[in-house]
């Protein structure tokens, strides 16, 4: 019920925009809403490696931290814009006006991409330990297109053993959260409540969960402040 109510508020605000036009706030002024997205699993596109052997083993991995961060930015930005485009069309707004309104919204993200110096891919026999290397950490354990854990083994402390969970750690939390900000200069959207933006971001996460990376985002959730 709450989601439906908030959705109608978003449509109402977009309808008001057709009357007021796509007015912009005074130069240098903008409203900002911060958000976080968490609860996802780590697609290899959100990690990176500059090691040729890792990139051969994991074709979808990003080639640099910047590339991984750009992937995340585009993913989040496109889904937020998709939500607002759908709301605008539901309100009967012409595409040109929707485009102008979206031009008054900037999506910024902060994300710490995981570097993989070594990769063990699709290790199908969990009872068979595998070694690590001193100079090849972080050592990413990849199944399919997901970085599922890290191997912390080095010659001094033995092997990584999935069956016993020895020298295995989960992906650190700093790689499992996306922080961002919505910078708004449109005079109408600048006055939207936190609840209205929460609805937008919730719907964006729903789009992620039904898209090409849905298996990674089906349990994701978002919070707006």
Image: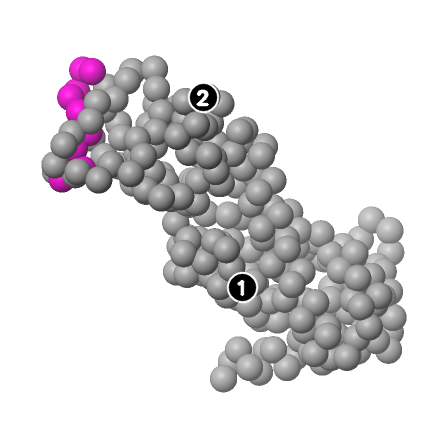
N-terminal-most mark, 2 or 1: 2
Which SS does the magenta portion mostly show?
Answer: loop
- In the rendered image, residue 10, in percent from the top left (x then y), is placed at 67, 75
The local secondary structure at tag 2 comes to: loop
Please tell me which residue is depicted at 73% across the width and 66% down the height of the picture. 189
Cβ atoms at labels 2 and 1 below 8 Å apart: no
| C-alpha distance separating marks 2 and 1 | 33 Å
Which residue is labeled 2 in the image? 51
Left or right of 153: which side holds 194? right
Judge by depth and name the residue closer to the eye, 220 or 126.
126
Query: Who is closer to the viewer here, 52 or 84?
Result: 52
Q: Is residue 166 visible?
A: no
Tell me: 190 left or right of 52: right
| Magenta-drawn segment | 155-163
Q: How is the image coloured?
A: one colour
Residue pictured at 59% horizontal, 32% vertical:
66
At x 27% / y 30%, what residue is drawn? 151
């Amino acid at each position: 019920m709450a989601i439906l109510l908030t959705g109608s508020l978003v449509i109402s605000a977009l309808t008001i925009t057709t009357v007021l036009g796509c007015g912009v706030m005074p130069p240098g002024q903008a409203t900002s809403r911060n958000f976080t997205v968490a609860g996802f699993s780590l697609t290899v596109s959100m990690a990176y490696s500059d090691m040729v052997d890792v990139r051969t083993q994991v074709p979808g991995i990003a080639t640099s931290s910047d590339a991984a961060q750009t992937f995340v930015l585009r993913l989040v930005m496109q889904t937020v814009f998709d939500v607002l485009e759908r709301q605008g069309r539901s309100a009967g707004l012409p595409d040109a006006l929707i485009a102008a309104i979206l031009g008054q919204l900037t999506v910024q993200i902060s994300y710490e991409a995981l570097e993989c110096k070594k990769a063990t891919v699709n290790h199908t026999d969990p009872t068979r330990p595998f070694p690590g290397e001193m100079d090849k950490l972080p050592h990413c354990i990849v199944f399919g297109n997901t970085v599922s854990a890290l191997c912390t083994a080095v010659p001094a402390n033995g092997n990584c053993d999935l069956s016993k969970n020895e020298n295995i750690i989960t992906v650190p939390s700093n790689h499992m959260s996306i922080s961002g900000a919505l910078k708004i200069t449109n005079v109408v959207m600048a006055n939207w409540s936190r609840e209205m933006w929460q609805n937008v971001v919730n719907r964006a996460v729903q789009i992620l969960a039904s898209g090409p990376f849905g298996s990674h985002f089906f349990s994701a959730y978002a919070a707006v402040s």
